[in-house]
Image (cartoon, rainbow, N blue to C red):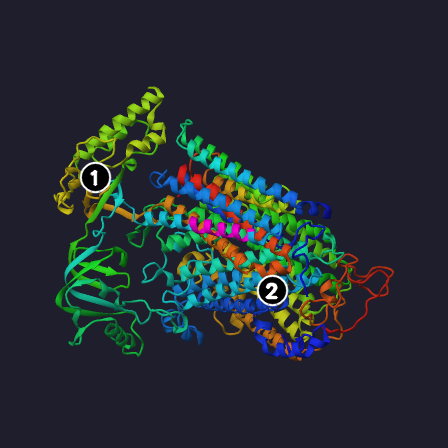
Amino acid sequence: MEIPYTVKARPDTGLWNAKIGIWLFLASEVMLFGGLFSSYIFLRIAPEGPWPVQVLTVGWGFLNTLVLIFSSVTVLQAWVALKMRKYNHFRVWMVLTILCACGFMAIKSVEYYDKFHHYGILLQDGSNLEGHFPKGKEYKIKFSDVKTVTLAVRPNDKGLFGLSIFHNGSDADFLSYIVEGKPEFKTPDGTILTLDKITLKELLHKELGKKDKDGKPAPESYIKLEATNPLRFVIPPSKLFDNAYNASKATFRDSTVIEGKLESDQMHLECDRVDLRRLFDAEEKSDEKALASVQNADVWRILGEEWKTKFNAHHDKVLKEFKDKNGEKRNPMTSSDYVRHVYAMKLDAHGSEHSSVVPAATNNGGHKAQEHAPKDDHAEHATAAGGHGHPEVTIEKKDVKFYSNFTPKYGNYFAIYFTLTGLHGLHVIAGALVLTYFLLFGKKLYDKDPEHMANRVEVGGLFWHFVDLVWIFLFPLLYLL
Amino acid sequence: MSHDHHDHDSPEYLKKQSKIIWIVGGILFVATGITVGVMDLDLGSRSMNIAFGMLIATIKASLVMLIFMHLKNERGLIYKFLSFTIVFVIGLFVLSYLGFIDPLHSNLISTK
Amino acid sequence: MSAATVTHDHSATEHAHEHEHHEQSFLWKYIFSTDHKVIGIQYGITSMMFLLWGFFLMMVMRWSIAFPGKAMPIIGTILGDRWAPGGIVSPELYNMFGAMHGTIMVFLGVVPLGFAAFGNYVMPLQIGAVDMAFPKLNAWSYWLYLFGGCLMMVSFFLPTGAAQVGWTNYSPLATTAQIDVKNIFFTGQTQWLFAMIFIISSSLLGAVNFITTILNLRCKGMTWMRMSFFCWAMLVTGFLLLLAFPPLEVAAVMQLSDRIFGSSFFLPAGLVDGNRHLDIAGGGSPLLYQHLFWFLGHPEVYVLILPAIAIVAEVIPCNIRRPLWGHKTMIYAALVLGFLSFIVWAHHMYMTGMGPVVTSFFQITTVLISVPSVILLTCLMISLWGGSIRFNSAMLFACAFIPMFGIGGLTGLPLAFSTIDLFLHDTYYVIGHFHYVVAPGTIFGLFAGIYHWFPKITGRFMNEKLGRLHFWPSLIFMNLLFAPMMVQGMAGFHRRWYDGGKAFEETTKVSNWLSEGWAQFAGVFGVHVESNMLGLNALMSFAAWGLAISQVVFIINLFLSIKGGKKTTSDNPWHATTLEWATPTPPGHGNFLVEPTVYRDPYEYSVPGHKCDYQPQWLPEGEEPVDKLTHMH
């Protein structure tokens, strides 16, 4: 049995099977990315806060565009080589194509990595600080003097028919965040236990098996453990339920509760940008009013009044430049570029835009930023401790309304950015895998029926061009506009 | 039809194709440069920049479709179902856009 | 499927070797097969099991509706204390079963049975192809579907249970449900999304395969208009799946991102869940999800119904011995239906505060789409006129399909108007309406297909007596189940009341002749039922369980007939005209003994001037069909 029209075109449709198949598939891909692009537009029509513009490194995107276009050319050359029955040429072009795919993904990872380590902190009043957590001073929640740990056991958290694949409730995860003290606890029945993964599991298992008077497992029970010595915890915030802690208590995602004293939940940030655009209405048409509304922003309390002075100077400078260019008549607030340049200011102590006077950044807790910074001969470096000339500040958690690194959580721009580029990246990987398969295992088919092989490469190429085509739209939408 | 096919497989034709591919690749490179170049031009408003950027992207995409994906000499059948796809994408976009912003109200009525 | 399916090979020299090979590779022959017929049967068995499971979920729900707060006998104790404490169906369980009933029935039951199972088995045979265009891809579609289905099933056994927010999975509820857990991956809501991504991918691959096969693998002489309506319907359905599913995939990916990465595609700022502010950036749009969902959701309705109509359109001409009336008209109607189905979706969203312009647009398109639907139905009905009807089980189901689907369609018309929809939205009226379309409508069509093609698949007939015992109770119980829903719905019963409206007794104490009559009828048997609308709950629940019992007859019939049914004596036992009956019984790998050629239109029954009352497509002019039974060599 042989399926007809795998190589030769069917006379009445003029097409062979795989070509119809790939075009149909691409049609559905058009719907897929069409849905995503229209989502992009709807999210952009009414964003929460200002829509980030040109926050990605254009150079990387530009380079990636060229890489993809080049790979589109090479995959076509590979196909032409096959058509002309030059198998070795085909191999060279194919290797080049696959290298391009790897290069594209490498650049993509560099960009992603950069975003994962870049944070934005929205303060209570709506002003926003962006920057990096200094090395070794990542945001952690520190609890000291912890004497009680309550484990949650949920014997009844079972699926249908009483069957269950996973259990909710405590696990041994919390043990790995103890930095001081021995994990030695007194259990409710009076025995002293040094907890590790195994003993904890046994402890939980015993409790899971417990039944109540009627012989039914209790829906939920707790094991209260008293620490024999005070413990100190340093916990990454992602391990807790969202902001589920207060001055004396913290709840882990596995429902384990520790009780002690909140030692610190300060954030340290090397600021590289301050964004004040949420402080006034997006439709605000008066520059004076907008400027007035940002004078009492929370950021100045954290960065220091000196930075406000610099901001005002920066404002005047940009305003003057704008007026020189556009004349007095045009309202600067109608230009979103103007608003962005002024009210989302880059903080760079070395930057040529700013005066050479470097303010001493302070925080509201009264700690001098210098305390955290390595001592240096230059006053500049003492405050701009980040090594990039960015001021380092300390922010109390209570001043923070919302914070995130530049991941989908940070806002819809990054959400759609990661979704679009992530799905596109998956297509690149899938395409590259298919092309690699052609490269490695194509010889046999080529010897048997070179035209069939050429058809396969053409189909793979069509998919590859589509991936390129999507990127052609993604690049301006996400990087430039 | 079979005559056509023969033409498309001849070495001369393929050599010419190879050359065209390089030329189109070059045009795409330049167009990418232009896209980046015009992004900071002041065209009056950001929407103009967006429109202009999308225009260039559309031109580039058409080149990829017509030349790289040889849609130029493809059969009518493919055009048929691609045109349906485009109609439905536009339908998805326009109709849900109208669902968000009604022409009679002229302001956002239900984005959130 | 049966022992009789052992294929014999073309070449006698290879026979011994190959036969040995077959014995060893049972796994490859029946499990990992790339043969479209085996895959079709795999789809059929899997989807029927899902249908059964979805039906079970519904029966538990109907207990809760009819007897809220009362322990469910036997099953209640099996469900587990977490979900049914003391055997009483909990509201969470009701929500979970409600959401999963819809999901399973639509995405794992009816679509795979109608489109994938029947399409896979019958369509390549009817166009005279040796197999699908991409057999391996076909197998991949099935395995992706099965994997997605298993993920869905596994989610029942997670600590959070399966998804609970309705089959539409609307954000923000779907995003904020089940988030206070150790690991957000292992929650029913998240698994629902993962499973959907697999099921959607499977459907996309299937659709590509179907369309390519129909376009490129038609046999000699099989011109477009000689193609049976069934294949046309498959073509249209394929396009619906191909182009409508991707936006839902987008929605699923975005909702997944909302759940796992904490983004806010569908979450507005300042969202409060319980008593706490969610730690999200906000700025998303819950309506965007609904648009993307219903962009699939509405074409999906036609994906459900078109294969069923198509099966009925095959069964009817064969059993009335007359050509299908308006074959071409039906084809064009199906094409128009397919096109229009893409631009009617927002009639599910009248209540979201859309403006009048877009509402009017969707109202108009929705009313327009009833035109091709009515054309299809009318053609089927006119076909019956003057035919000499052979009432076998398949024909009974096909005949019942017409009025049942008709009721389903006509009750939908009022819902098309936004002003009426304001009143009926989310009531049992809507439930009654679409269940008439998909349950006695689509499922009856699918039953007709099973009875009709069973002799081709197994070489044996299904038992006709049991078939009637299956049909009549099914028809009666279906109507007892769904007709009162409309009555309740117009009285204002909301579709998501787990107690069937008991908590709202003050407002649901309306009665009419139906509810009073039912209460008196039940009283005769010593069952006390309230004489108001609430009493109808018990009627519908008893009907649902009665329906279940009548399906037992079908299951028994199916299994008994595989081994013990009456053997066919002909490759074409119904004396049908389409190409699938030209194959050996059962068809082996490669389908046809000789490459078929098509000489005429698909439904040439009772053509004047011929001895036989049917002229099969594959017989050249002047030859008369003969009954003979062949095997693959």
Whether residue A303 is visible: yes
Q: Amino acid at mark 2?
A: Ala
- Quarter of the picture holding the N terminus of chain C: bottom right
Q: Which mark is residue C117?
A: 2
Q: Residue at 46% of width from left, 51% of height from top? A: A99
What residue sits 58% from the left and 40% below the top? B19
Disc 1 chain ID: A
- The chain letter for the residue carrying disc 2 is C
State the image coordinates of residue C182 (x, y, percent, origin top left). 31, 63
Which type of secondary structure does the marked residue at label 1 adopt? Answer: helix
Residue A459 on the magenta span: no
SS majority, magenta: helix
Task: Kindly tell me whether residue A423 is visible in this rendering.
Answer: no
Q: Position of residue A228 (x, y in %)?
A: 13, 69
User: For the magenta stretch, what is the residue range?
Assistant: A89-104
**Where does the C terminus of chain C fall, quadrant-wise?**
bottom right
- On screen, A423 above or below C354? below
C-alpha gap between disc 2 and disc 1: 64 Å
Quadrant in the picture for residue A127: top left
Image x and y of residue C482, in percent: 55, 61
